[in-house]
Image (spheres, rainbow, N blue to C red):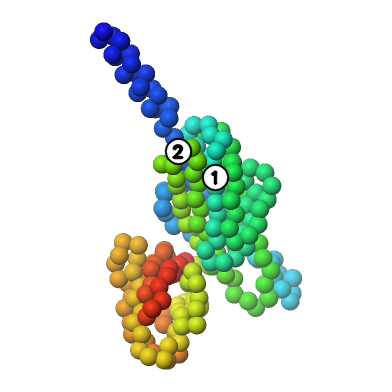
Amino acid sequence: MKKIYLSMLALLLCFGVAEARKLTFYIGKTAITPGETVSFEDIVVDDYGDYKEVTMAPELYLSIDIYSSKVSLTANCTSGQSIQMCAGGSCERGTSVTKDLTLSANAKLDLQFEFIDEFDADAAIPVVVTEFTALDTAYPDTKVSFTLVMGEKGSVTLIENNACLQAVAGGVQYNVEQPTLLELVDIQGRKVLNATVSGFGFLPVDAPAGIYVYTFGEHSGKIYIK
């Protein structure tokens, strides 16, 4: 009886191990920690005189430790630009792209992700912020995500610009009739900026690269500093 019990326990343990699965994003050869914000500054600019073409193409990969044919991958550009991802087949383009993938165990799939667009010759290169999420749809606990911030170091971008607060080079531009409090906190909840402003003006934002949450009067959102 004891042998039967031990055999059943071993079988259950093996089954549990077999069912455990893990999705992992990579940038190049480096695994990305779930929830991490990753910066990418390699920008290719082709100058055509009166306009330029800007390309940002990080080497992004996705892997799983156990074979799965039910992985859903979404790239959502929260800064509003059109992105492209070709992982696993046809290329899809838009501000949000979702792909249904089949992954082989321990094999990294190239996401073939990139941003390409044309701008006026003197236009600033935008900061492109994209949130990636992957999930084996049969196993909800496999969900992983990270944020990719692409653009020039030192740039600032808001998820949603509005008439009161807009991102500009090196900081934010405000336009309010009454004195308004602007607060900025990091993802650990630590306050990095606290200022009351009024009228029309510019406020520099000097903080380490990362994601911050701002509150400005009745407005709130996220600021990405690169």
Residue in view at x 53 percent, y 34 percent = 68
The mark that comes first in sequence, 1 or 2, is 1
Dot 1: element: strand
* Residue 187 location, quadrant: bottom left
Q: Which mark is residue 105?
A: none
How far separated are the C-alphas under marks 1 and 2? 11 Å
Nearer to us in this view, 159 or 155? 159
Q: Position of residue 94 (x, y in %)?
A: 63, 60
Q: Position of residue 192 (x, y in %)?
A: 32, 72
* Residue 52 location, quadrant: bottom right
Residue in view at x 37 percent, y 90 percent = 178
Q: Is the residue 5 above or below the residue 190 in the image?
A: above
Residue in view at x 42 percent, y 49 percent = 34
Residue in view at x 29 percent, y 14 percent = 6
Query: Where is mark 2, residue-wise?
Result: 139
Query: Where is mark 1, residue-wise?
Result: 72
Nearer to us in this view, 182 or 7? 7
Q: Is the residue 214 above or below the residue 94 in the image?
A: below
Name which residue type carries label 1. Ser
Q: Is residue 194 left or right of residue 150?
A: left
Q: Is the residue 17 above or below the residue 37 in the image?
A: above
Nearer to us in this view, 153 or 63? 63
The answer to whether residue 26 of the structure is visible from this angle is: no
Name which residue type carries label 2. Tyr
Dot 2: element: loop
